[in-house]
Image: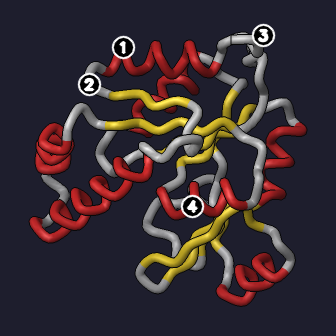
Amino acid sequence: MAIAPPDRRPLVISGPSGVGKGTLYNRLFARHPDTFCLSVSHTTRNPRPGEQNGHHYHFVSMQEFEDLINKDGFVEHAKFGGNRYGTSKMTIEEQTRKGKVVVLDIEMEGVKQIKQSKFDARYIFIAPPSLDALESRLRGRGTETEDSVRKRLEQAHNELKFSQTPGVHDKIIVNDDLDKAYKELEDYVYKPFDS
C-alpha cells in the first residue's frame, strides 16, 4: 500500500542543469512506488529514437499547442530552439484524481509563470554546493561542448540568483551529498502539515 504524503499538492522541482534533480526525484519514485508521478510535458518537437508519445512527452502539432495556449490549458509553457514545451493543467488534474502526487521538473522561466498563475504547489529548488562543483559535474558528463557548458553555467548563475528571491521556493536543498540531499527531500515531502 502506497503511503501518500500529508500534503498532496504537486511538487515543482527546479535547479540548474546537472545539479541532480532527476537523480533525487527518481529515488523518491523508487522508494515510494505508486505514490508519485512525473508530469509529462507537451512538445511540438519530433520524437527522438525510443521516445514514446504519452510516456516521454505528449507530441503535438504547433496548431494543437497554440489551441491549448488559447484555452488556458497550460500552467507554464516556453519555447526552446524553435520548439514549444508546456505543462498541461489537464495532465496534472488527471494524475491527482488517480491519487498521485505529481512532480514537475521545471526550469526557472516556467517557475516564474507557475508562480504568477497562482498554481497551488510546493516549490523545491535543488542547488549545487558551488558553481565550480556544478562545472565539474557538467564536464564529467562528457556530453557537453565547451559552448554548452558555458551557457549552462551562465544559466545556473541566473537560477541561483533567482532562487534567493524571498517567497519563490518553499525549500532549497544543496545537493553536495546525494544521500543527505535525498533525506532532506523526502523529509520535506513527507513532513506533517503543521511543521
Residue 105: mark in rendering: none
Which mark sits nearer the N-terminus, 4 or 2?
A: 4
Residue at 58% across / 59% down in the picture? 112
Residue at 63% across / 63% down in the picture? 113
Q: Is residue 1 above or below residue 112?
A: above
Residue 176: mark in rendering: 2
Which mark sits nearer the N-terminus, 1 or 4?
A: 4
Q: Are marks 2 and 1 in contact (CB under 8 Å)?
A: yes
* Circle 4: residue type: Gly
Which mark sits nearer the N-terminus, 2 or 3?
A: 3
Name the residue at the bottom extreme. 63
Instruction: Identify the residue position indicated by label 1 in the image.
Output: 180
Q: Quadrant of residue 170?
A: top right
* Circle 2: residue type: Asp
Instruction: Identify the residue position indicated by label 3 in the image.
Output: 1
Instruction: Identify the residue position indicated by label 4 in the image.
Output: 110
